Image: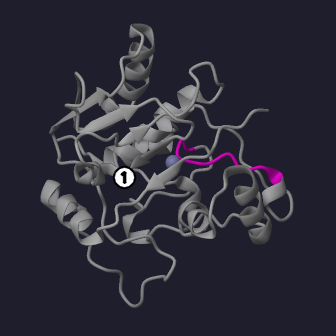
Amino acid sequence: MNIATPCKLIHPDNQLASYQVAVNENPHNERPPLQGARSKRAIGNWQKFWGHGRVLTISFMENLPVNLKQRIERLIRQWEPATNLTFKFVDGVAGEIRISTTGDVSNSYLGTDALLVPSDLPTLRLGIAPDHAEFDPTVLHEFGHALGMQHEHQHPAANIPWDVPKVYEYFNLHHQWTKEDVDNNLFNTFDANTSLNGPYDKTSIMHYVIPNELTVGDWQAGLNTKISKLDRRNMRKAYPKP
Ligand SMILES: [Zn+2]
């Protein structure tokens, strides 16, 4: 099977600005530090969800065929009922979420980090051909990040039996990822305090495809193609309806 390049979440360089913009947008993003020492491998102790009840603007940076635009919009709107946001598609580079379909990688900034991106640059990339089997799941996955959702395989309770040396080797060989890229996108778990306290969900759209050869023993994760029940529940927790 032709597996798409896994998505890399983009982290802004300026962590202080990231924190300030998140808390300014939505005061609920602030979370008190956990009691005692936080895990060294944890990803950060605040969340990046958009302000409750707001209109979130979304635009396409390139001129796409109308049917492709509509297809992407329909996929993105699958998230909308689980939030308290209104998605508004606007023209050109006017969106707070700016989608580019050029290149061959798919990635996104996490939630409010998009506000730190210069307005002539994309905040979400779909570097995958529309006829690829993973196109639709990729749109759902990347927009999950745009709404503030992290990678599910980095859930603190995931306990994936990684074959660590093999994973570094595989991602370096196939995707030219550094050790840091692998740590940031596979091994580091997110803080239990920012996990919305939901259980680990192997069926999440935010989970990577994980081939059996990258784990010790018999463990793999196939391609999830839909927003799962727990994904919706997490989204409703992040964006509660009044
Ligand atoms: Zn991702």
Q: What residue is shown at x 57% (from left), y 30% (from top)? A: 128
Judge left or right: residue 87 versus residue 131. left
Q: What residue is shown at x 86% (from left), y 62% (from top)? A: 217
| Magenta span dominant secondary structure | loop
**Is 63 rendered above or below residue 37?**
above
Under mark 1, the amino acid is Leu
Mark 1 sits on what residue?
A: 110
In reply to whether residue 12 is colored magenta, the answer given is no
Can you say which quadrant of the picture contains the N terminus? top right
Tell me if mark 1 has few (under 14), some (14-19) or many (20+) residues whose alpha carbon lies within 10 angstroms of its own. many
Report the label total.
Answer: 1
Question: Considering depth in this image, is 161 or 108 the residue closer to the camera?
Answer: 108
**Residue 23 image offset from top left, x and y in percent:** 18, 62
**Is 232 rendered above or below residue 216?**
above
**Residue 188 image offset from top left, x and y in percent:** 55, 69
**Is 168 rendered above or below residue 141?**
below
Find numbered disc 1 in the image and state the secondary structure of the residue it sits on: loop
Q: What residue is shown at x 57% (from left), y 66% (from top)? A: 157
Can you name the residue that lies furthest to the bottom here? 36
In reply to whether residue 210 is colored magenta, the answer given is yes
**Residue 205 image offset from top left, x and y in percent:** 54, 41
Start and end of the magenta stretch? Answer: 204-212
